[in-house]
Image (cartoon, helix red, strand yellow):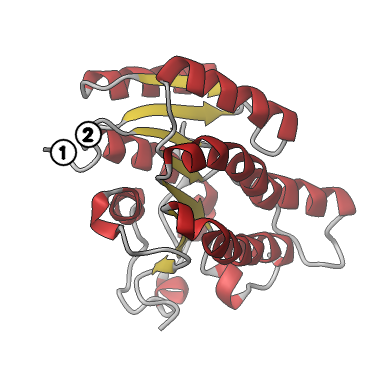
Amino acid sequence: MKLLEHKIALITGASRGIGEAIALKFAENGADIAFTYLSSDERAKALEQKLQQLGVKAKGYKSDAGDYASTELLTAAVLNDFGAIDICVNNAGISRDNLLLRATPEQWDDVIQANLKSVYNLTRQVIKPMMKARAGSIINLSSVVGIRGNSGQSAYAASKAGVIGFTKSIAMEIGSRNIRVNAIAPGFIETDMTNYLKDGDTSKWFEKIPMQRFGKPEEVANVALFLASELSTYVTGQVINVCGGMTT
C-alpha cells in the first residue's frame, strides 16, 4: 500500500518549484491532489496532466492564498470536488529582497500577506473539516532565513519566522483532535526563487553549507511526505530543517 493512498491533499502554490515537487511526490504515493496557482493557467494544466498520469484525481484552482475570502471559496470548492481534506501544505510564498531602508511599505505588506497571512487563512479553513474528522496533517513551509535571518530579507525572514511561531501555537491548540501541524525550513533549494544565487561563483554559498551543494525540491518533498503520512503520527509542533547542515 502506498503511503498516502486514499488521502486528499491540498497544496498551495504548486505549479512550480517545491510545491510542484510535493504534489508529484504525494501523487506517486497515492494521494488525490487539489492545488492552487496564481498566474499561469498553462503550467497548472500541465501539472494536472502529470498528476493524473500517476493514476490519481487532480485539479488546479486559481486562487490567492493571501486573500481570506478566496480561501473560503477554495476550501468549499475542494470539499465539494474531493469530499475531504486530509493534508494541507501551505507552500505559497514570494520574496521581495531589499535592504530595509530601501524597502517600501508595499513590499513589506506583499511579503507578509503572501507568506504569513496565507498560512493563517488556509489553516483556519481546513481545520474545520479536519476537526470534524478528528484527523489531519498541516505542513507549513518556512525557511532557514526565518530561523537565522539574512541581510536584505527582513520581510521574508519576519514572515517565515512568523510561520514557525504560528505552527507551534496551532499544534498546541489542536493536537488533542489528532491534527498534526509541522513546518519545514528549506535552505538553498534549486528553484526559480534562488536561481540568481547560481550566477557567478557559487563557492561563497557553499561555504555556508556543510554538504557543499544546493538542495533539490524533491528532497524537501521527501520530508513533506514523511510529515503527511502515518510515519509521523506522533510528530507535531516541529520544524524540520532541510538545508544541508546550514543551521548546524
Q: Residue 99: image x %, image y %?
A: 77, 66
Choose between 78 and 206: the one closer to the eye. 78
- Crowding near the residue tagged with mark 1, few <14, some 14–19, many ≥20 C-alpha atoms within 10 Å: few
Residue 128: image quadrant is: top right
Q: Residue 136: image x %, image y %?
A: 41, 45
Residue at coordinates 50% horizontally, 43% vertically from top-left? 131
Residue 83: image quadrant is: top left
- CB contact under 8 Å: marks 2 and 1: yes
The amino acid beneath tag 1 is Lys
Residue at coordinates 39% horizontally, 76% vertically from top-left? 209
Residue at coordinates 30% horizontally, 58% vertically from top-left? 233
The quarter in which the C terminus is drawn is: bottom left
Residue 5: mark: 2
Residue 2: mark: 1
Residue at coordinates 51% horizontally, 45% vertically from top-left? 91
Q: Residue 235: image x %, image y %?
A: 36, 64
- Image check: 4 left or right of 182? left
Q: Residue 182: image x %, image y %?
A: 46, 59
The amino acid beneath tag 2 is Glu
Residue 40 makes an appearance in the image: no
